[in-house]
Amino acid sequence: MSPGARVDSVPLPPADAQRFDTVCQFCIVGCGYKVFKWPVGHDGGPEAGRNALGVDYTRPLPPLGEWISTAMHSVVTEKDTRRYNVVIVPDKGCVVNEGLASVRGGGLAQTLFSRDRATRARLTQPLILQKRSHVPIAWDAAVDLGARVIKAVMDRWGPDAVGMKFFDHGGGGGGFEANWAVGRFFFSGVGTRTASIHNRPAYNSEVHAAGDAGVAALTNAYADAELADTIVLVGSNAYETQTNYFLVHMVPNLNGNTLERKRQTFAGESVEAARIIIVDPRRTMTVATAEAAATPERVLHLQIEPGADIALLNAIGRVILERRWYDVGFIGDRTEGQTFEAYQRSTLAIDRPLADVVGEAVRIAGIPATQIYKAAEWIAAPKRDESRRRTLFHYEKGLIWGLKNYENVAAIVDLALLTGNIGKPGTGCSRMGGHQEGYVRPAYPGGRPALNVDEAVRRGEVKSFWIGGCNPVLTTLNAAAMETALKERGAVVQSALDRTEGRPVGERVARIVDALKLGGMFVLAQDIYMTATTRYAHLILPAAQWGEVNLTSINGERRLRLYQRFMDPPGEAIPDWEIMARFGRRLRGLYLEDNNPQIANRFLDFTWKTDEDVFIHARYQFKGDGSDPIEGYAGVTYDLLRRLGTNGIQTPTRIVNRVPVPTVRVHEDGRFFTPSGKARFIPAPQPWPGYAAKVAAQRAQFPFWVNNGRTNHIWQTLYHHQHVPFYAEHNPMPHLEMHPADAARLGIASGDLVELSNDVGRVRAMAYVTDAVKRGHTFMLFGQPRGAAGDLVSDHVDPATTIPYYKGAWAAIRRVGPQPEIQRTLSFLPQNVAR
Amino acid sequence: MPTRRDFLKLGSAGVAGFVATPSPAPSPSAAAGPSRYPVVTIAALKDVGIGAVIAFAYPDGQSPAMLLRLAAPAVGGVGPNREIVAYSTLCTHKGCPVAYKPERKMLICPCHWSTFDPAKAGALVIGQASQQLPQIELRVDNGMVQAVGVAGLIYGRHTNVV
């Protein structure tokens, strides 16, 4: 039982409490929240007039009321040492979540720095690795040392020897401001191509195929899920990981509660409650809740074999072609004709009989032909009145981290183009998203396919490696090899640091450069907590987090909002953009001292005073002309966003009569992001490419497929949640879902410690026996501090995109032993039951 | 303050959807020690058979709760095999009444499908609540099962005992 469980009251904010608008720091959906803050000891009262919510708490609230759970409150200490209560509740006025919290958002207050709780583990001072431990160093000294090492690396080995792996997202640990500053530093300033994005080994799009087709990554509005005839989810466990998009916008359509709105929006068109197709190798809670909402007859769960998405989606496309259910008008007017011909010929294999193509998909995907035909019908068969079916396609990591990233994404985008389901109400083709977005950066100087930074680190080509707001030791592929490189190459530099302790900085840098010549690597890490990665850093730079800075981000329907600062960062932590600015100014100074104004002038812009300075700078430099398909924010200011609160404005914005105007739905004007303005089908060489050799060999050698990903309770690497008992105790280890028959054969019970091993590595997990997975399939929580699924993932990447096949690991499993206390206290009831 | 009549009405009607044996009236709040919580007798231990589901209200008439006798020992359980537990039945997500599904050994909320494990102190199995289900603290005194406290804040309240 968590310590918080016994709390049986919460303080109420007084009527004069400070109020702030914010957005959840976690998943892509970006639910709106209200923040109340007031000094400890000055609580409000239960009468409506005596509390800031204006709610009558003198009697119990009815269901769906504005209740403050104990997780929604915490006490924080500001820099002036005064203690304040903070309450963070879901905003019923926000159109995204309409007052609902997810399990993650409900605990936002628990993530705040507090001297009374485990979040006191936050990094509060810059640290330097000295002998066996990290010891404090002044900011100026840390910046001076780090900047001098980076300059030395640039001068001796060139900019590509300066490696980085950084966040590029919105929400917590990201935002337009932080992203712009990072991009200005590394791309405009250093000019390195050895860059990679937080969750992958390179600097690349996860959806290159959509980009090449001219289709935006986030096309639709969440309201389209209320209007669609059919919703298609490929590799997305929405109930658990995009919760309130599913609960607030999809469920009402599945249970018929949006019929009246559909009638009004589509006058004269036949409407009914939505159907949903879920392509997922697991019977997830999303499947169970969809069936509970929609009745099972309107839910089609395609329980696919690993790596088979391309075969399945292309077979569905072929059926649609054969049945003449494709959108002739859309294809003729809105797509480049020769690409449609190539798509039919190679991807849909029109020279082969239909039964052949479908039969091949049945064999590869393990899905009956009847379900493939039914899926085609639900996606594209005309409605009762012969009007076109409105189908909304969504895809996420199950597809993106799949067999072959480029062809996987091409397969679903092509299907949306074939059926004309982009740019109209009730339609769309969008990734669901993991984290929020806010990609605002100067152009990456490298080419495509992007350079594999993990490999460059292992080979010793990276002389300084700056890791910002991410944790590759837990999340990258072949993760143990990354850890070994950090440890071994870092140790060479550490001995130089130890030998020069207390010596002038010039001498220290000279000895560090000597170490780099011997294969060493200087590691900087910028984060909010000590992590499995930061422990190898020579310099640790403490960053401010969500709530301690103003930041802006967009959600999965491109809703741009201001996440207001409502408390001080702890200790000496500062915003990410300010860390980059300090380094930028120092590098400029060092190059001026070196009489090199040319390079010095690449570090010109780092004089921002406030977060809004960075926001506006990025707008003028990059995203402000309205032509960007996703984040362009012409005319938007903090002041405007303050007025728009948790509903914000949907990007891209354009200026009409001097006022920024939102884009509810991208491509509604019929134009796509290609030179011709028409979309392109992306043809694949054949309906299914097969497994890459390295993956095929592993698959042949080891009996269990180890799928991996996120779950309902846990955000990413648990960087916050490991410090909050309610979440940490739910997942004390990475759990491993196993089929009951497989578990029985190996003598494994729920809660047992198990070991997974293959040719790449080994890792331990906690067994969780469930029929959610098929026999021979397993599913492991990814990136858990006590076990990284990436330790089993081979270094294979899609050669076209440098995107890994993270979901493609096979391993042997053995029982290690019981865990009696975990088995006594933790629940192992099924997590996919809704009725 | 709710009257005893209110209590009886809400105690049986407040949690619909499953069979409830009639719950006896609470003993007048003979508070134990310094606790703000009343002591409420729910049933005689001999009348609580395995599989029993008894609706009652605690700590006052407007707070529906449920006593369960499970088939195996439970965290926080009382009785001969520590298998008797009780919970507030208002979901800690948005306050809808949770239902006990004996065949699944699970409490399920019909609104947004949060599920709770009655054998594990009301832990959230999966779903969107940000607290476990408040567990009613029980004791057996003179052959009677009594509620004596609540671990966790009950939905809809800023404090359990108003």
Image: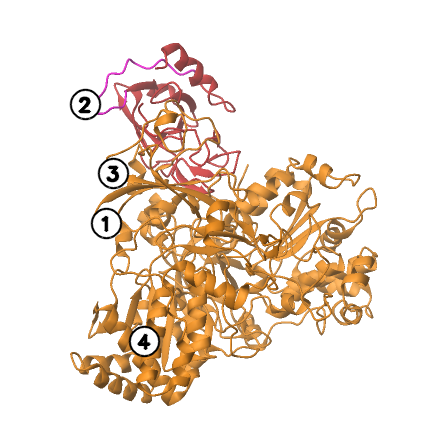
Q: Which of marks 1 and 3 precedes in the sequence?
A: 3
Task: From the viewer's perspective, tell me whether residue A726 is left or right of residue A126.
Answer: right
Residue A649 visible somewhere in the drawing: yes
- Provide residue A492's location: percent of width, then percent of height: 28, 82
Task: From the viewer's perspective, tell me whether residue A130 is left or right of residue A301.
Answer: left
Q: Chain of mark 4?
A: A
- Provide residue B16's location: percent of width, then percent of height: 50, 22
Q: Residue at x 82, y 66 (%)?
A: A353
Q: Which of marks 3 and 4 precedes in the sequence?
A: 3
Q: Residues within 10 Å of mark 1 (few under 14, many from 20)?
A: some
Q: Residue at x 80, y 57 (%)?
A: A327
Residue flagged by tag 1: what amino acid is it?
Arg
Reading the image, the residue beneath label 2 is: B33
- Labels 1, 2: one chain: no
Reading the image, the residue beneath label 3 is: A40
Residue flagged by tag 4: what amino acid is it?
Arg
> Which range of residues does the magenta coloring cover?
B22-38
- Provide residue A209's location: percent of width, then percent of height: 64, 68
Above or below, A488 relative to A752: below
Residue flagged by tag 3: what amino acid is it?
Val
Q: Chain of mark 3?
A: A
Please state which of the two labelled residues, at mark 4 or mark 3, is closer to the viewer.
4
Task: From the viewer's perspective, tell me whether residue B66 is left or right of residue A216.
Answer: left
Reading the image, the residue beneath label 4 is: A586
Q: CA distance from mark 4 to mark 1?
A: 33 Å
User: Quarter of the image holding residue A330?
Assistant: bottom right
Identify the chain drawn in red: B
Disc 3 is placed on an element classified as loop
Q: Is residue A451 on the magenta stretch? A: no
- Between residue A778 and residue A39, name the one nearer to us: A39
